[in-house]
Amino acid sequence: MTAQTNREAFIPYRRSDLIELCIDDGQLPNDDVQKFRDFCEILTAYYHVKSQRTLEVLKDSFAPFNPDADTRTRVAPTAQQSAALEQRLVQAFATVLQRANYSALSPEDLQGAFAGESLIPLKTRIDFDDYAHMVFYYRGDNFKTVQVKRWFRQQEVVVDNFERVALLLRFKDADYFAAKKQQVADLNFTPGKMYLYLYKNVPRYDLELLFPNVQVSMNWLDRLLVLGPAIGAAVPLLLRVLPSLLLIIGVILLVIFGAEFPGRLGLEIDDAAAQNIFPVLIATMSIGMALGGFAAKQYSTYKNKRLKFLKRITDTLFFKNLVTNQGVLYTLVDAAEEEECKEIILVYYHLLVAGQPLTRDRLDRQIEQWMEQTWDTRIDFDIDKTLANLTALRVSAAGADDAAALVQVDAAGAYQARSLDTARVVIDYVWDNIFQYAATGVAEFAPALMERTES
């Protein structure tokens, strides 16, 4: 269950559901319901085309760094071009994440997360120098109560949890890893390539497990759990092989220093046993087999323990991973499109039903209260970004004024929505003018177009 929830800009409803929430609010006249649906439909189509442009930029920039590429490159980019593409991708990726209401996790916060106690009892180490670029964003920071096995019993633990984690990593080139004496064939990633990840429900203190170059080892407690039984088993084993061990030592001393030397050390060596090599060989073999079998058993115990840890990590990443690499671009661009549409719909709807101009602060407060009191959803609405997007949706033809915009801003800085009839005309105009080719060439081709239409 959720123990605590922080406010954030993310609106936890699908766009289509949010439209219905506005209609179910009951403040729109019946004659305006379909008009409102029409407005939202064209708005969605417009933002979908805009998002497609963003997606193409991301795909083109990611192509030289895609570790999963199955297409050929027409012309390989130069080092300078690759650097420019990389920079453009990193900036565009961060912008899309911000549009989708993700928040950046600073290097200091990331180091603090690594210092915390993980739900998986492992000792981990990450070499951040391996990365040429690293972008880390999250969405949905909340606290959840989970069941954890501690000291052979289940305990309830409250963990700081990220609902979504987006990660961009670009590894340094092969020369860097060669200088570190690391074999490229032994790496589980390709140097010089870029890796994109999108995870769900990741505890803050398990973030280090998301990095491909994480090195895992046992912590001190687990080492003691392995060494303790090993020491306990070694003592009776040594007592059992001690007679054979003394026999071997005595024979060696006898051969090197003579028959009297072992007696000086208190070692009584039977002459017949000393002259017969078979007891010595048998003693040697028994010690070797006992110690070898014991060492193999303890090593097997350690390996099995480590394999269980690695399996736990693999299971965690498998079930928490949503999508990787180029698929991340599609998912995040779609999320950004959804968020921006939902935000504009909320602002326009509340200005529409208010019946009077609203200041920025009052509008922001009204939307947050409406979401919390009516739909039991606490958000920190991003009013500034949304007002900028909304005021940009206007007729941009020569001579147009604020009367051709979706919203008006008065001298006091208050906002007022245009009627749905006007809003539909404006958004339809914006949609029709995404591409401007027809506007410049329509005079030349108008007669032919008219003839084709009439026929």
Image (cartoon, rainbow, N blue to C red):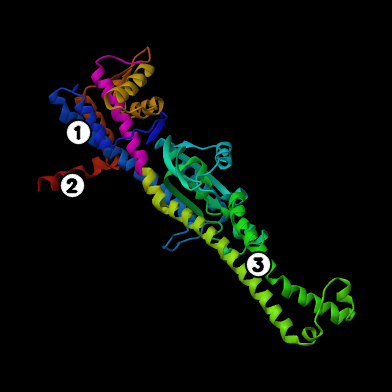
Magenta span contains residue 8: no
- Reading the image, the residue beneath label 1 is 38
Task: Answer with the quarter of the image where residue 420 lies.
Answer: top left
Neighbour class for label 3 at 10 Å: few (<14), some, many (≥20)?
A: some
Disc 2 element: helix
Left or right position of 428 against 220:
left
Q: Name the residue tied to disc 2.
A: 448
Using the numbered discs, state the Cα–Cα distance from disc 2 to disc 3 in whole angstroms. 101 Å
Percent across and percent down for residue 72 are 43, 63
Task: Name which residue lies at 50% across and 42% down.
Answer: 136
Q: Amino acid at mark 1?
A: Asp
Q: Is residue 297 above or below residue 209?
A: below
Q: Is residue 347 magenta?
A: yes
Residue on which disc 3 sits: 237
Magenta segment, which residues? 334-359
Which quadrant does the N terminus fall into?
top left
- State the residue at coordinates (44%, 51%): 316
